[in-house]
Amino acid sequence: PHTVYMSRHGQSEYNKIGRIGGDSDITKDGQEYAKALGKYTFEVIQGNSEGLGKPVKCRLWTSSLRRTVQTARYIPRPVLHDKDGSTWKQMDGRRMHGLDEIFAGICDGMTYQEISERYPDEFVLRKENKLSYRYPRGESYLDVISRLDPLVQEIESYREPLLIVGHQGVLRLIYAYLVGRPREEAPSLSIPLNTVIKLDLLTEGVRETRTELLT
Ligand code: F6P
């Protein structure tokens, strides 16, 4: 596509209490963001605020997790294609969707504080090399890169605008790929909540616009 929009899900119950992973619902603030994202999609991505004829058809991707699906709830049709789970794979007995958040294995559902107390060595190892560090029975950023690979290829074949409602880790990687930042930098890139990142993929390079929808 010429334009890729990406957004993290609205604030989740786990975000609010500093826990990683899991599959929690979005909070009240998350709901507010979901509504704002619906309005943004209608007005900006689909072009209805300009009052010019037909709305633009876009594509919508979410992960399989409740927080992205709930965040996309108010996004109006027409949407050409919802990413539906065509990229499921088996991960330590769990089915994972290509766009699901990095899986923290034995640390899933913990706070960073809890990880540092319970698994201090792991905590240090991850700090030292966040890109290649693999959570025990979980994933590394490199693992996520390989499961994202077919999806990234697919992005390149689209002609319509694409909106990805995703997760911090996964969006860092897709963002780094699209703007051409080295993957070593990806795990520390800032992808804030409540913000739509618009990337216009132009022949002369990528133009980026960030719009905070809740202030
Ligand atoms: O805290 C939100 C979250 O999406 C977690 O689910 C995930 O483990 C984490 O961000 C990834 O960020 P980092 O790689 O900085 O821990």
Image (tube, helix red, strand yellow):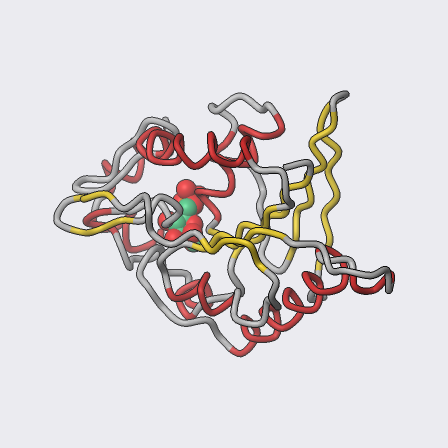
- Relative placement, left or right, of 83 versus 126 is right
Q: Residue at x 46, y 71 (%)?
A: 26
Residue 39, image x, y percentages: 70, 68
Picture quadrant where residue 137 is located: top left
Quadrant, the C terminus? bottom right
Relative depth, front residue between 215 and 94: 94
Q: Residue at x 52, y 70 (%)?
A: 73
Picture quadrant where residue 133 is located: top left
Single out the residue that lies furthest toward the bottom.
28
Residue 185, image x, y percentages: 52, 27
- Relative placement, left or right, of 32 versus 113 is right
Single out the residue that lies furthest toward the front.
53
Residue 8, image x, y percentages: 53, 54
- Relative placement, left or right, of 85 versus 76 is left
Residue 136, image x, y percentages: 18, 40
- Relative placement, left or right, of 174 versus 211 is left
Q: Is residue 187 above or below residue 106?
A: above
Q: Residue at x 86, y 64 (%)?
A: 51
Quadrant, the N terminus? top right
Relative depth, front residue between 28 and 93: 93
Single out the residue that lies furthest toward the left.
93
Q: Is residue 161 above or below residue 113?
A: above
Number of numbered discs visible in the structure rendering: 0
Q: Residue at x 42, y 70 (%)?
A: 13
